[in-house]
Amino acid sequence: MRRALFRSALELQAWNLFRASSLGFRTFLLLLLVLLSALPLARAELNESDFKQWGLLAIQDNGRRKPVDTFAREAILKLTGRGTYKDLAGRVWQPNEFILSALLGEAAGGQEKDWTKEPLLLINYRPLVEKLGLDRERKRFSFDELAKLPELNRLAGEVHQLGMQKAELDRMQQEVRSITERMTLFSNLSRGAAFLIVPPKPDATIKDAWVIPPEADKTFGEARFAAATEKLQGMVGAFRAGDAFNFGLRARELRTELRQLCPTVYPTESELGTEYFYNHLGAFSTAALLYALGLVLLAAGALPSGIARWLRVGGVLVALGGLLFHAWGIGLRCVIAGRPPVTNMFESMVWVAFIAALFGFVFFARYRSTTYLLAALPVSFVTVMILLQAPAAMPPSIDPLQPVLRDNFWLTIHVLTITGSYGAFLLGLGFGHIVLFRYLRDPLAARADSALHFWLYRVIQLGVLMIAAGTILGGVWANYSWGRFWGWDPKETWALITLLCYIVALHGRIAGWWGQFGLAVASVLCFAAVVMAWYGVNFWFPSGLHSYGRGVGGEGWAATILGFDLVFLGLVICRKRQAERPAQRTPVPAVIDPAEESSLPAASV
Amino acid sequence: MPASTASPPSPAPVQPAVVPAATRPPAPASSKPAWQRNALFRFLASVKLAVVLLAILIVASIAGTLYETTFNADVARAYVYGTPWFNAWLVLLAVNLAAAAFSRWPWQQRHTGFLITHLGIIILLAGALLGRFLGIEGTITLFKNRPPDNQLIVQQRQLYLQEGGAGGTLSWPVNVIGRRPSAARPWRLGQTPAGWTVELVDYAPLLAADFEPAPVPSGGQPAVRVRLFSKRLNRTMESWLLVGSEEHAAFDLGMASVQLRAGRAPATPEAAAKGAVAAANDIDESIFAFAHKPGQQVAQPAAGKAGSGAKVRLVVTDSARQVHLDWRGATWDFDVEADRGKDQDLSGSGLTARIEDYWPDFLMKDGQPTSASNEPREPAVLVRIFGQLAPDPEADSLAAMNAPSENGASSANQATIYCDAASGALTYVLKSGATPQPVVGALTAGGPGINTGWADWQLSVDQSLPSATDYTAFHPVEGAKKGPEAGAMAQGNHTEGLRVRLSKPGSPTVEEWVPAGWQVALPTGGSSAPTQLSYGWRCESLPIGLQLLDFEIERGEGSDAPAGFKSTLRVIDNEGRVDSGQCWMNNPHNYPGHWWSTFTGLTFKMSQASYNPENPNESTIQILRDPGWLLKWIGSLLVCAGIFTLFYLRPHPVFVEGKAPSARGQKSSKSQARSSKQAQINPSSKKT
């Protein structure tokens, strides 16, 4: 009763204060109230941030020691193909809570949760779904549904046999292997076999395999492991009780205990913390967002208006912020992995998008044309978005390096240069589209804009230099490492083809077969070779010595985009011809130094 | 007009030359020497030729990668990269580059980048050609504790021939990718010292080896060709049996077996039963079972003892390892940990089972089973079953029939054919699970079959040879993948092979298949020793010998997957110098190791190529000697430097937003840049 009185008195006071305050302060108070009411006072459920200490435990998985947080993200992504899971009851599960709940068979707060009935497991290939006699409209199935299929069992046996013989698998077999791996992972999660969170023995080296807590007694002795067991039980108990405070506390204590068991191999607080921070920073999505925002501002600034200049300045600054986030993400990844991040498709796409944006800014700084940013921002944005939309095809996990790629300075330089050239060509693609779009709108005006063509030419030049240097460095490195300079491996051949395509584009202009417009067309067309060398070889040519960064899928998208681009090119070419018809049909020549043809920038008259 | 081009062009660099390069008339005759005006030279130096050459190079390379991914690297090499026209194309490109460079003669400072680039490419191509024709590339497989080896295996097929009488070995390179010999168009390889003409008359991507005993006048062993036919299953099985042959003395169907012995069958069923039952009831068998391959147990009866016909299954879960033993419808379960090494009575059977050993990661190493790790990757168990079987005439023959035992000696169903070496008479003893008494009878080759009593299988003998010897016949596998693409593939027991014909006037012509990796003897004339033919990789003798001192496998973090391999080598050259070193991934060992040798490529570079997961004492080393290495290096450097000079160090007009085009290096003014930004972004609106 007293409490109620006290409370109403408080409310009365608050109300008086509210009435007395100015309009601005009132709005502020209202907002504060809304925010405060969103914070529940007592919770039966734990929210994502309560799992931080649990997520900071170290686990050994896939050849690396990593925070449980990373493991949980990779696990849920691998199982479902998505970053979170929405269950049948409509509840969205975050990775950390999901794996703990899958292990215990309970949700936080202690209610039962039968994960074997949840349609978690992704089959991303409809012919397989049909072959298994499942509902063809669904992509995700529960463990129980799949476990009772004799056909899947039979196919898995076949694929296992083929795997033992190291035979090549077709798409169906690859998908069967994927679903088998998902089922194994799920069963390892629910049986606890995946939770290798204890270093194996007091004098372990980093090569030794970690163990699950029930097995740790054997190596450490019960007495020595008792403290850790107690913390572990405390943590699980707090989770069951929905007690966020003690859950976090016990998890942190458990981590301290485990580290004490074997301090030499247990990751340090800062290592775990850095990776946790990277996981939750969302550097690349933030970068993409800022690129998009910057692009909108710059585009708005291109239209005549009173604030156009300020819009442009704002756009440049926002985009620069995006670039910084992008660099931050890449830097953190380098720190976590201890190597440059260009060894799988995810990392190379991030890197190429970054290089495209970076070169856009460098060229902008040199030639002061915002066209560079208008070209760089959309391609970087689209590249990062493709990446973030297809986590199953290009998993963002940080994996240990293939032996062939370890510890090599020249290799690092070679890969960074080659992918850097992809970035330059990507910028060229964006710039080429802007130029062609201008031709579409007004061919004659576009033709007369020498500066525009010169700027595009500079981008192509940079790309050509980098891909030539990168390909040759690759040869030097291959000679050193594999014993031969050039072996016509698909990857190196396609790098050469890409180089030759752009060189043909440059020399064809010198030969007078096409002019500056032809170069703009080439900057778009030749990018198909880059796509082939980069994505095509990785995804379609499984053989070869460069067989890392593999994946499947995406052919449809690539073909569709290429198709649209070809239609666009056709339209532009038609439009240009139409516009030139009344005038002379002679091509507009480049400015040529009489004694010297090669490499002159286009400056039309 | 954009602000930039509206202003008057700056003087020197932006000359309004309006004629495209290629259509430009030649410079005045007075300034050009005669050779530069030559039509052929102008064609060779033209940039149009360069574009055409490059374009075709692009198309060819794309075709090459498609060949590589559809077939394999060898096919791509044979059809594209290794062909004479591809190399000629590269030489033509080099000529074009050189001619283009000389067409600028006399050279001026502004040509620097262009010349460096072109020179670099020419040097690079020259280095590649030099390496290709003078270089050495091959592999040596080394074993620990073996004497030095200097025989380099080169990836090229070769036919070897050695005549019985005359000493030397002849050899010819054979390349069947892309074209093949045929009977209509044989390839003549050459003539032997004894006057035999060697020809290739066919090539098969896949040859099957068939055991086919050949009759000999004396000193052979009896052989019969048996046929088993089941109407119900619509299936026929045929096989040769040869007494004394290791692999072909018996024929195992799974549910029954047929074996051949010399001599005569026992005269009466009783005598046969006694012998057979006594033998069949004395059981001692070792069975390997694998958790990941249920149904693939490997069973081996002890010498002179019979198998039990039991099935052993190993089930490994995280918490337990269980062995299930099925025998004649009954099942016994054992726990690997608890029951290991203990005798377990199989109640009612008179047999005893014992779990002898367990391996979590089974691996045969030096002929001994071991465990590669403690991870349960390939769990295997060894169970021994032994004892005296109580005679059991009611044994469930149907069960035995339906559950094919893989142990090679099913005790219930067995036919033994006896062939008398002197008379060739065939007799048999037939034992079937369905009838308690063995049946004794006589057979004739080509005659009617006998009903075995094993389901509806009929047993007959097609052919019998009282005296025969071991012989393997080869024939191409029908329906095998046609075409050259299958050339380098070998599947299972099948291998590619050549059909070789030896002919000599006055002697009968002989023809035989020679499969890769086999040695085949051809009888060439009477009493002299036969001619030996073999088909395999080309071997080259190196002036250095290699010994494997040590081989290490490095494992990845927390796993047993190999992450790296390291070989420690000793190199001995023919002048007695000894050197040792290590090579591992990305770290080759060079001999001789002086810096000038490695720098010029005049060294033997040894890289870790592959290893044998089943033999830790074996390592394959790749050896490379590339005299073109220095040229490749210099060429690479020049190309990069040249392109850089071309693009960044030459004077050229520069367009900076809001500024008139200027020569490179001039500073732009900020105020101008700002003022025209608007115009630049919106080109259509800036036309004023």
Image (spheres, coloured by chain):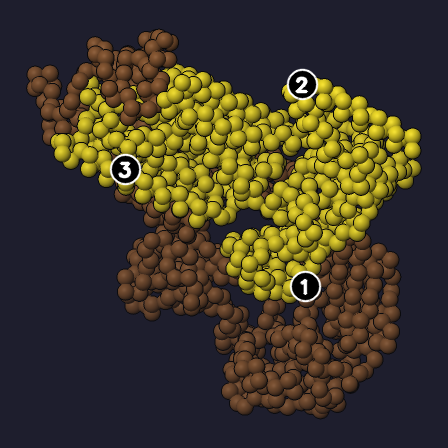
Chain colours: A yellow, B brown
Cα gap from disc 1 to disc 2, whole angstroms:
68 Å
Helix, strand or loop at label 1? It is: loop
Instruction: Please give the label number shown on residue A119.
Output: none
Q: Is residue B112 above or below residue B400?
A: above
State the residue position of label 1: A148
* Circle 1 or circle 3, nearest the eye: 3
Q: Which residue type carries mark 3?
A: Val
State the residue position of label 3: A572
Residue at the far left: name it. Answer: B29
Residues tagged 1 and 3 counted as in contact (Cβ below 8 A): no
State the residue position of label 2: A22
Question: Badge 3, how many Cα within 10 Å: few under 14, some, many 20+?
Answer: many
Q: Is residue B168 above or below residue B468?
A: above
Do the residues at discs 3 and 2 belong to one chain? Answer: yes
Helix, strand or loop at label 2? It is: loop
Do the residues at discs 1 and 3 belong to one chain? Answer: yes
Residue sitting at 20 percent across and 34 percent down?
A579
